[in-house]
Amino acid sequence: MIETTPPELPENSVADGSGVGVQCLVLSSGVTIYCGDSVELLPELSGFDAVISDPPYGIGWNTDYTRFTSGFNVERTNHKKVANDEKPFDPRPWMLKMPVVLFGANCFTKHLPVGSWLVWDKRFDNGKAFLADGEVAWMNKGHGVYIYSETAQGCVRKEKIEHPTQKPVGVMAWCMDKASVPEDATVIDPYMGSGTTGIACIKTGRRFIGIEKDPEHFETARKRLEAELAQGDLFLRQNSQEHQP
């Protein structure tokens, strides 16, 4: 891991109005993450080919999951609130001339032109669900509706829960496929959260730039991404040993 000053940013640059400096970590040749405000960083960033993200929806989501009393096997943790979720989300800085996928778009449709809708069906096989049956993302390509099914209800999911609104890795990988993001392309997630989009990039041979404003979530993302990169390194070492004469 290499810690470095973000490209083209001065040493005393700040991520937001709090006076906290931008942190940039180069985890590998294909994975770079920033702790800072993505909108403020955007003018200084380049070299990415797609925007795939699950931003704050601007709905003030209550992340205290101890409030749930459902009979479903739900995760009952009082999570830290999602940064900036208390104010309306404006997607316009990220509506660029490249593939763009933004989750939660049903909450900010007034800013969106015609596009396609990607639907994550999160129900159980019997059609039941905890809270919503699914979630939707807007894509700036075409005008169709596409559905991906993967159950993730409360504690019933493939990955450990490390963020209150964490998406499954499979969902984010599917979004990149639907947006026709090629292998070896660089994907930016300006609201990285716990790093799920980055893990999907590593697993599918894409490069990743992630930005997260909350230092705690940034640290969670760093640990998850480093663990995923280590899995790849382990596979390469084992494969090399198996083919040694």
Image (cartoon, rainbow, N blue to C red):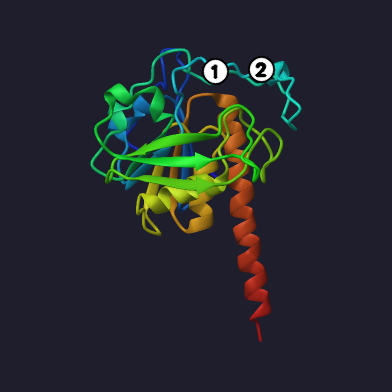
Q: Amino acid at mark 1?
A: Trp
Q: Nearer the viewer, residue 215 or 91?
A: 91
Q: Quadrant of residue 42?
A: top left
Query: Which label belongs to residue 184?
Result: none
Judged from the image, the secondary structure of the residue bearing numbered disc 1 is loop
Reply above or below: 5 against 17. below
> Which residue extends farthest front?
126
Judged from the image, the secondary structure of the residue bearing numbered disc 2 is loop
At which x and y percent is residue 216? Answer: 60, 26
Disc 1 crowd rating (10 Å Cα; few below 14, some 14-19, many 20+) is some
Could you tell me which residue is drawn at 65 percent across and 33 percent down? 162
Q: Amino acid at mark 2?
A: Asp
Is there a contact, CB below 8 Å, between mark 1 and mark 2? no
Left or right for 215, reference 31: right
> Which residue extends farthest bottom?
245
Query: Which label belongs to residue 61?
Result: 1
Could you tell me which residue is drawn at 60 percent across and 46 percent down? 226
At which x and y percent is residue 61? Answer: 54, 18
Could you tell me which residue is drawn at 50 percent across and 19 percent down? 83
At which x and y percent is residue 153? Answer: 65, 35
Whether residue 11 appears in this view of the structure is no
Disc 2 crowd rating (10 Å Cα; few below 14, some 14-19, many 20+) is some
Q: Nearer the viewer, residue 62 or 206?
A: 62
Query: Which label belongs to residue 64?
Result: 2
Could you tell me which residue is drawn at 64 percent across and 81 percent down? 243
Whether residue 227 appears in this view of the structure is yes
For marks 1 and 2, give the CA distance.
Answer: 9 Å
Reply above or below: 233 against 108. below
Q: Quadrant of residue 82?
A: top right
Quarter of the image with the C terminus is: bottom right
At which x and y percent is residue 25? Answer: 50, 39
Q: How many marks?
A: 2
